[in-house]
Image (spheres, rainbow, N blue to C red):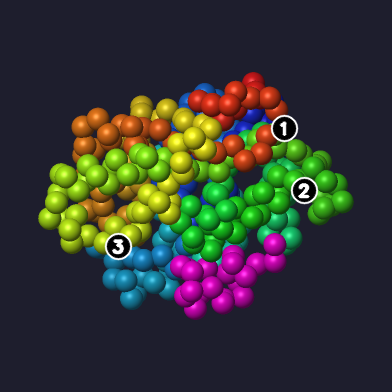
Amino acid sequence: MANQSRLCLMAVHAHPDDEVISTGGTYLRYADEGLSTVLVCATGGEEGEIHDPDLDPVEAQPRLAEIRAGELRCACRTLKIGTVEMLGYRDSGMAGTPANQNPSCFHQADLDEATARLVRLIRRYRPSVLVTYNSFGFYGHPDHIKAHQITHAAFDRAADPDFVPTPNLTPWQPLKLYETAISREGMRRWREVMRQQNPEEAANRNDDGFDPEKLGTPDEQITARIDVRRYLATRVEALRCHRTQIPADSFFFKPLPEGIGDEMFGFEEYVLARSLVKHPPKEDDLFAGIR
Ligand SMILES: [Zn+2]
């Protein structure tokens, strides 16, 4: 049973590793402040690639969910996440792939049924703050988009006793809902610095997957910046847990360029999508107005 006297942060993510990439420092900060932290992970990440050099991809593929569950446990220990709940869906794969059609994938899940699963967890853990992605799922992945949809729906319905009767759990209303974001201006500067530092590598690299115009959020729309500079090393350590997903030569593991590294990676940014409390227009704490 959750300790109801403690404030709770619940982030709803799509795959193992997402918890580190967009919210790792935030989890560490609130764990250090003594708040309770919960991760809801929608899928097992079965469709991920396999970058771990110690694994034979063909042999490892059928048990990727099990491998990634182990990686997730490692990352959650490192991020001091109090509770991990799997929502139990299959990874839908990237948009347009056959995995999208698998009847047990998250993308195919009935919206009410998937929302009900999340509502039960909200009533059990009673988070004041929910976190998920924006309506584009940050980068268009069907599972990230679905996580956005069910989290918004659950924010509206968790307090409604007629939506999913839960005899042992009373309805609960979260107070704020945030969407993760990365500053578009920050991404532009970062890309520029990377190009200047490694012009050859930049010329050969396809960085379409890192397009600030598609993925970045204009600075004026960002409402909360969480300072996580003191957690950068721990967050990288948590990322190393996800051996199948993050190649050892990933830029995540390279030294950050002078100056811009801290600015780009030292803050986790959010857009406040819903709030039932008064709060400052620009926040440095997701619990502003609640405590
Ligand atoms: Zn993901």
Number of other residues with Cα within 10 Å of mark 2, as a class: few under 14, some 14 to 19, many 20 or more: some
Element carrying mark 2: helix
Element carrying mark 3: loop
Which residue corresponds to mark 1?
276
Q: Magenta region: which residues?
A: 92-111
Specify the quadrant of the image occupied by residue 51: bottom left
Q: Residue furthest left?
A: 200
Circle nearer the viewer, 1 or 2: 1
Q: Real-space Cα distance between discs 3 and 2?
A: 40 Å
Amino acid type assigned to the residue bearing label 3 in the image:
His
Of 265 and 13, nearer the camera is 265
Residue 84 percent location from the top left of the image: 55, 47
Q: Is 93 one of the magenta-colored residues? A: yes
Residue 176 percent location from the top left of the image: 65, 35
Amino acid type assigned to the residue bearing label 2 in the image:
Arg
> Is 79 displayed left or right of 147 in the figure?
left
Of 58 and 201, nearer the camera is 201
Which residue corresponds to mark 2?
157
Of 105 and 98, nearer the camera is 98
Residue at point 41% right, 65% down? 48
Please, is residue 178 above or below residue 207 in the view? above
Q: Quadrant of the C terminus?
A: top right
Q: Quadrant of the N terminus?
A: top right
Which residue corresponds to mark 3?
51
Q: Give the numbered dot on residue 115.
A: none
Residue at point 71% right, 51% down? 153
> Is 232 displayed left or right of 73 in the figure?
left
Residue 133 percent location from the top left of the image: 54, 49
